[in-house]
Image (spheres, rainbow, N blue to C red):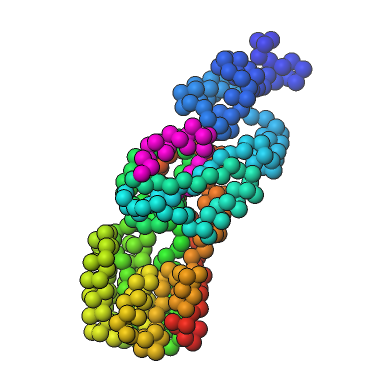
Amino acid sequence: MSDSFDFKAGRPKRVGLAEVAAAAGVSKATVCRVLLERGRISPATRQRIKEIADKMGYQSDPALSALTRYRWGERVSAKERYSIACVLVCPHPDSPGSVLDTTTVKGLETRAAEMSFIFEKHLLNSHVPPEKLSQTLYARGVDGIVFVITGPVFNWSFHWHRFACVTMGFDGEHHTMNSVTSDWFSALGMVSAKAVEAGRTKIGFANFFRGNPSIDTRIHGATVVERERLTTRFGRQPTIHWYPKDRNLDKPLFKTEGEAFLRWFEKEKPDVVIDGNCMAHWWLRDSGIRIPEDVAYVSLNAQYQKEPHIAGAVHQLQRQGRIAVDFLFNLIQSNERGLGDSPIRLTTPCGWHSGASLPGI
């Protein structure tokens, strides 16, 4: 009893890290990392130490815990020097070498530098086998990965359990990753409201619907809802033009779909087209239809840096990159690795870009 009771304090002795470490045959630092859910420690060792701590009645000292949180909260980046990677996943297995969107990367790089992280960029396509890339990243000491996915992708195998994972852009169809993406539903409502504000009351929607849970399904739902609202307010609206579900948008299909879109346009005669991307703009232009004299045009994904005359939604990619790094940091600290059954989705609102294609705004 003398070993387990503190006669001076009049209470049982507190079981500390040293006692748990001695019983488990590991260092105090290892026990500390396990109890704080930090560091790379095998699941078996982690579980054994937790069971020993519970059996011995270990309880953390509130004062010491508060001091630890204070110290690590201000100095964790310098103390840990986490390493994160940005991986661009090409939309198709045989996509040629691509370059990362500079706006997205800038957000990732800037935030990583602010937190003193080691940051590196990689490409994933048919020339870079996923499993080999995951082995390389693990060997380089990478703690977490931000996957930048710009379109529907193939299903690939990866050593998910080794990394904290966050995706930007498309997700959810094959891999249940935590994600940071645009609020597409509210974005469509915003561009529709802008068109009405500009005096347009016969709005034609042209969108994709490929069944991708992360984007297309939300845009599909938003489009149907918005068309019903416009019908109630202004009367019958043009039917929705859906682009084909075929993902191989090669040149013949691109031409064929352009012809189908123009037939829809001549039949429905909208006074503004709200497009899921910018393809309809090219089809209208090439057919001799003037924008905005004959029809106004709005894009749900305006490439304002390349085509500033096109009005539409602007996706806050740099901000999303910063948020993705913060999200990844939280996952690393919580030791949450791999894919989850209930991934968390963080959405950011879109901004508006005024362009000549929608006069009056």
> Could you say which is closer to the camera, residue 342 or residue 161?
161
Q: Residue at x 48, y 65 (%)?
A: 315
Q: Quadrant of residue 187?
A: bottom left
> Could you say which is closer to the camera, residue 22 or residue 195?
195
Q: Quadrant of residue 7?
A: top right
Q: Where in the figure is residue 198, as x and y percent of width and height? A: 46, 86
Q: Is residue 107 magenta?
A: no
Q: Where in the figure is residue 279, as x and y percent of width and height? A: 34, 72
Q: Give the extent of the magenta segment.
A: 127-147
Relative height, residue 313 to residue 339 (above, below): below
* Residue 53 falls left or right of residue 74: left
Q: Where in the figure is residue 342, as x and y percent of width and height? A: 40, 46
Q: Is residue 143 magenta?
A: yes
> Could you say which is closer to the camera, residue 60 or residue 338?
338
* Residue 164 falls left or right of residue 67: left
Q: Residue at x 39, y 89 (%)?
A: 293
Is residue 47 visible in the rendered image? The answer is no
Residue extending furthest toward the right = 8
Relative height, residue 302 to residue 168 (above, below): below
Q: Where in the figure is residue 85, as x and y percent of width and height? A: 51, 44
Total numbered badges shown on the rendered structure = 0
Q: Residue at x 56, y 32 (%)?
A: 39
Relative height, residue 32 to residue 156 (above, below): above
Residue extending furthest toward the top = 2
